[in-house]
Structure formats: structure tokens, C-alpha cells
């Protein structure tokens, strides 16, 4: 996995491509245009997203990175129908969700979107197996046994199915959460810091599975992460700063992501210095 070099790199020599030169995404699973999210009003007004245009590819693992407060969670929550944008449009698998009401969004989230959160969010009174099939049970849809078996086997949960969450390790709980996210064959799975609470071995298992779900089950996955080692499992890394898309990196590895974070940080500081100098004049 090497760097691509292009004539239009966001930071020369870095392999990073700026938004104007993003590789075209054919058949996007998620599409956003002019996405803006403003929180609060007056003195407390925050423009968490500031005109984001992005296409996320079907059948890829996309990682979203950026400094704290850059808008990663806001972007993911809007794309997943958990929060509404102030302006702009979002399509998930060809369906426009940005104008949907709460009831429609709830139905969409139940059937078309899978979630993996940092805190697992399993139901403590249910067994692992019951947690996994919960989205289908709520939607009153039958469980595809072959899919259930494939997912459970791939995640090595077969001998844990009758345990409750408190009887499982953190890694096992997160693997149950991954199985739950995938069981209904959703259009897209959103994972918010899925390895934030895990040690490196458990993290590698969860990330390996998310990548396998893309490569072998054709799943589309979008993951927010701070960790270059986690983002290195992705096909594509998107970098956000101040509510805007800054750059993308394709076929990354941990080193190229670390370099990218350093180069983008330096470029931002350079721009900040120029702004400060200009302001002083
Ligand atoms: N509900 C809210 N009300 C007001 N401001 C908010 C709200 N949610 C987020 N923000 C603000 O929007 C901006 C973007 O926040 P967001 O959580 O999306 O960033 P992030 O990149 O996910 O940060 P982190 O990496 O720290 O989780 C921040 O300035 C944050 O304080």
C-alpha cells in the first residue's frame, strides 16, 4: 500500500488530495451536498459543519479523522440520520433523508443503517444472540440464519451466544455490537470510535472484522476514529478541520496517516501564522 502522487496534492509530496481533486466516487452509498450544521445562537453559535460536499463509496471502509471539535461526530450523526443538518442534502442508498421527519428517520435507522458506538450500547438483560438479532426483532423481520451463522462465526462468538454482556470482555461486547450492526444487511454501517475502549488486540479483531465485512460481505462502513492504526484499515481516509473537508488519502497505512496528520497540522499552523501576521499589520 503506497502513496499516490498527484499534481494537485493538498500538501505537496504528502499523497494527500484536496477536495477539488478527490477521486470520483461511482455509485455512492452516502452523498452529502452543502452540508451545514449550526448549533446554538448568538455568542454560543457554533458552525460545526460548514458546507461539506462528500460522496462515500459503496463497498468501501471510509475513515473520518480530524482534530477534536472539527465536526467528525456531527458529520457522522447527520449522515446517519441521528441529527438533522441546518442546510444541505443527504442521500443514503439513493433515499434523501435530510427532509425526513423523526418517524421516518427512526424507521430508516432501524432497517437501513447499522451503528457501532464506542460504549457498545448492548442491552444488559439480553443474551449476546438476542442482542445481535434485536434490530430484526424490533422491525418484526425474520432472521436470516445463514447470515447470522456467517457473522457469528467470523466474529468468533459461537461459544458466547448465551452469555449476557456483563459476562463478556470489552472486545467480545464490541464484536456483539458489530454483529448487531450487520445482521439486517443495512445499506451502511456507521462506527463512532469503535475501538476507543479496547486494548490493541481486541481493537485489531474488531477492525479486522469491519474490513472483512466490506471485503467479503460487500458491506459499506464509515468509521470516525482518532487512531491512525485504526484508520489504516480503511480504503480511504477523509480529514476534517473546522467543519470542512480538508483532504483525502487513499489506500493508507499507519505511517502515511501519521505523516498526513502532521502535514495538515503544519499547513494549518502556517495558515494561522499568516493570518496572525496579516492581522497585526
Ligand atoms: N449539541 C451541541 N450543541 C452545541 N455545540 C455542539 C453540539 N455538538 C457539537 N457541538 C460543537 O460542534 C463542534 C463539532 O463537534 P463534534 O463533536 O462534531 O467534533 P468532533 O470532531 O467529533 O470532536 P471530538 O473528536 O472531540 O469528538 C464543536 O465545536 C462542538 O463543541
Image (cartoon, grey):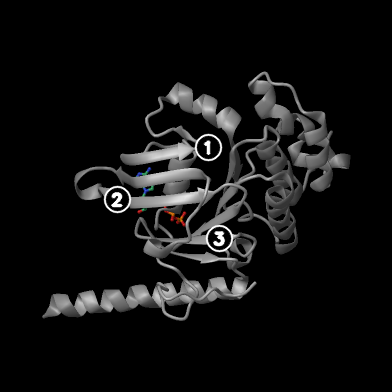
| For the residues bearing labels 1 and 3, Cβ distance under 8 angstroms | no
Left or right for 38, reference 124? left
Q: Nearer the viewer, residue 181 or 167?
A: 181
The residue that appears at 32% across and 46% down in the rendered structure is 36
Name the N-terminal-most of marks 3 and 2. 2
Q: Is residue 25 left or right of residue 35?
A: right
* Quadrant of the rendering where the N terminus is positioned: bottom right
Give the residue at mark 2. 47
Which mark is in front, 3 or 2?
A: 3
Residue 173 versus residue 243: which sits nearer the camera?
243
Residue occupying the far left of the picture: 281
Crowd tier of the residue under label 2, counting other residues whose Cα lies within 10 Å: few below 14, some 14–19, many 20 or above? some
Reading the image, the residue beneath label 3 is 236
The x and y percentages for residue 209 are 73, 52
Instruction: Using the image, determine if residue 172 lies above or below residue 81.
Output: below
172 to the left or right of 13 = right
Image coordinates of residue 132 in percent, x first then y, are 73, 34
Which residue is painted at 50% across and 53% down in the image? 25
Q: Secondary structure at mark 1?
A: loop
Q: Nearer the viewer, residue 3 or 171?
A: 3
Q: Earlier in the sequence, mark 1 or mark 3?
A: 1
- In the rendered picture of this protein, how many numbered marks are placed on residues? 3
| Residue at the extreme top | 140
The residue tagged with tag 2: helix, strand or loop?
A: strand
Image spot of residue 156 (x, y percent)? 83, 47
Name the N-terminal-most of marks 2 and 1. 2
- Name the front one of labels 2 and 1: 1
Task: Point out the image quarter for the C terminus.
Answer: bottom left
Q: CA distance from mark 1 to mark 3?
A: 19 Å
**Residue at which label 1 appears:** 93
Q: Say if residue 163 shows up in the picture.
A: no
Residue 213's label in the rendered image is none
Amino acid at each position: 500500500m503506497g502513496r499516490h502522487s498527484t499534481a494537485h496534492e493538498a500538501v505537496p509530496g504528502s499523497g494527500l488530495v484536496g477536495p477539488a481533486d478527490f477521486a470520483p466516487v461511482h455509485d455512492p452509498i452516502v452523498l452529502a451536498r452543502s452540508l451545514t450544521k449550526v448549533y446554538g445562537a448568538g455568542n454560543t453559535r457554533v458552525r460545526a459543519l460548514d458546507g461539506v460536499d462528500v460522496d462515500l463509496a459503496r463497498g468501501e471502509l471510509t475513515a473520518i479523522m480530524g482534530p477534536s471539535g472539527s465536526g467528525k461526530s456531527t458529520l457522522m450523526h447527520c449522515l446517519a440520520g441521528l441529527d438533522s443538518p441546518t442546510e444541505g442534502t443527504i442521500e443514503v442508498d439513493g433515499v434523501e433523508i435530510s427532509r425526513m421527519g423523526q418517524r421516518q428517520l427512526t424507521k430508516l435507522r432501524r432497517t437501513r443503517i447499522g451503528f457501532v458506538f464506542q460504549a457498545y450500547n448492548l442491552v444488559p438483560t439480553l443474551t449476546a444472540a438476542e442482542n445481535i438479532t434485536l434490530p430484526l426483532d424490533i422491525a418484526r423481520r425474520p432472521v436470516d440464519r445463514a447470515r447470522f451463522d456467517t457473522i457469528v462465526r467470523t466474529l468468533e462468538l459461537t461459544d458466547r451466544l448465551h452469555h449476557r454482556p456483563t459476562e463478556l470482555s470489552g472486545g467480545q461486547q464490541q464484536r456483539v455490537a458489530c454483529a448487531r450492526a450487520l445482521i439486517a444487511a443495512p445499506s451502511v454501517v456507521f462506527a463512532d470510535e469503535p475501538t476507543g475502549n479496547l486494548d490493541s488486540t481486541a481493537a485489531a479483531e474488531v477492525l479486522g472484522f469491519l474490513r472483512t465485512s466490506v471485503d467479503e460481505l460487500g458491506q459499506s462502513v464509515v468509521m470516525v476514529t482518532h487512531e491512525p492504526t485504526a484508520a489504516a484499515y480503511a480504503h480511504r481516509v477523509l480529514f476534517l478541520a473546522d467543519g470542512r473537508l480538508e483532504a483525502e488519502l487513499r489506500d493508507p497505512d499507519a505511517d502515511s496517516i501519521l505523516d498526513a496528520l502532521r502535514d495538515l497540522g503544519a499547513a494549518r499552523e502556517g495558515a494561522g501564522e499568516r493570518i496572525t501576521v496579516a492581522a497585526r499589520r
